[in-house]
Amino acid sequence: MDWLDTRAPSVVLPPDAPVPGALVLEERFDGSPELWMRVLAFDQAGMVAAGAVQSGSPLALLLSTEHRAHALWLTDLGQPIALGTTGLIDLALGAQGGLFPADVHDAQAFGARVATHLDRGGALCPWTAPLAILEQAFTLLGRGDLSAVLGARATGKRIDLAFDAFEPESALVPRLVSQSPVWSFRIDVRVGRTHQAWWATYKHGAGGWQVVQRVFIDE
């Protein structure tokens, strides 16, 4: 997906963004409300890693009781989250509803709050993560430049700060990254009365961006 190479590296969300989500595309063909396509992007590096809940990270307390339970269920499958072998489709087999975010403001959906394809400690992108996560993470990391990050986000621009070279001393704290290694997309298409949606997760590796999971949304 070209967006991951050209647009994702410069995404900056407002400081009050409830979830790390951005609109990629919304198009109504011939102006018809019955023929349209919408693509939403969700930065998993702006969420709490599912593995962080299992390891007891303080960031887990920012999640609802239900979301923590879902994250534990997911990690208890015994599969390495980072390899992309588990995800929301697996959770859908053991939980009911509210998995896939419907829009970029949907703070109730599990898929907008918990990262399914990051390692246990997780990675945190300060340019997309919600304020509550940033405040907790920056406190745990002992960093004093959160105000600079929020000021830059208020203007919609990134500033040069040393994130990628900063490694946390504890695995309970996510490492800060300037570029997210994992993005998930919700793709909705309507043709007449038929509406279908998919959830696709891309992870960056040695060979570039690769699809690690693509599932049909049936909610």
Image (tube, rainbow, N blue to C red):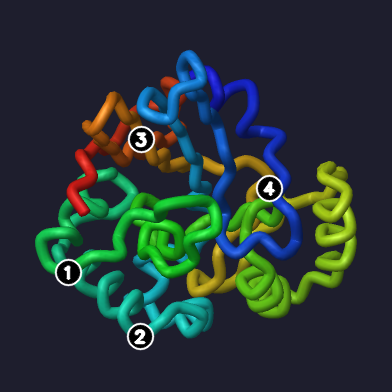
Q: Is residue 63 above or below residue 11?
A: below
Q: Which mark is residue 164?
A: 4
In three-dimensional space, the C-alpha distance between marks 3 and 2, rounded to whole angstroms, equals 29 Å
Q: Position of residue 157 (x, y in %)?
A: 84, 42
Earlier residue among tags 4 and 2: 2
In three-dimensional space, the C-alpha distance between marks 2 and 1, rounded to whole angstroms, equals 13 Å
Q: Is residue 189 above or below residue 99?
A: above
Please identify the quarter of the rendering in which residue 200 is found.
top left
In three-dimensional space, the C-alpha distance between marks 4 and 2, rounded to whole angstroms, equals 31 Å
* Amino acid type, mark 4: Asp
* Amino acid type, mark 3: Asp
Q: Residues within 10 Å of mark 3 (few under 14, many from 20)?
A: some
In three-dimensional space, the C-alpha distance between marks 1 and 4, rounded to whole angstroms, equals 35 Å
In three-dimensional space, the C-alpha distance between marks 4 and 3, rounded to whole angstroms, equals 34 Å
Q: Which mark is residue 188?
A: 3
Q: From this viewpoint, which residue is outermost toward the top?
A: 30
Q: Position of residue 84 (x, y in %)?
A: 28, 44
Residue at left 25%, top 35%?
196
Q: Nearer the viewer, mark 3 or mark 2?
A: 3
Residue denoted by label 1 = 95
Residue denoted by label 2 = 65
* Amino acid type, mark 1: Ala
Q: Position of residue 104 (x, y in %)?
A: 53, 52
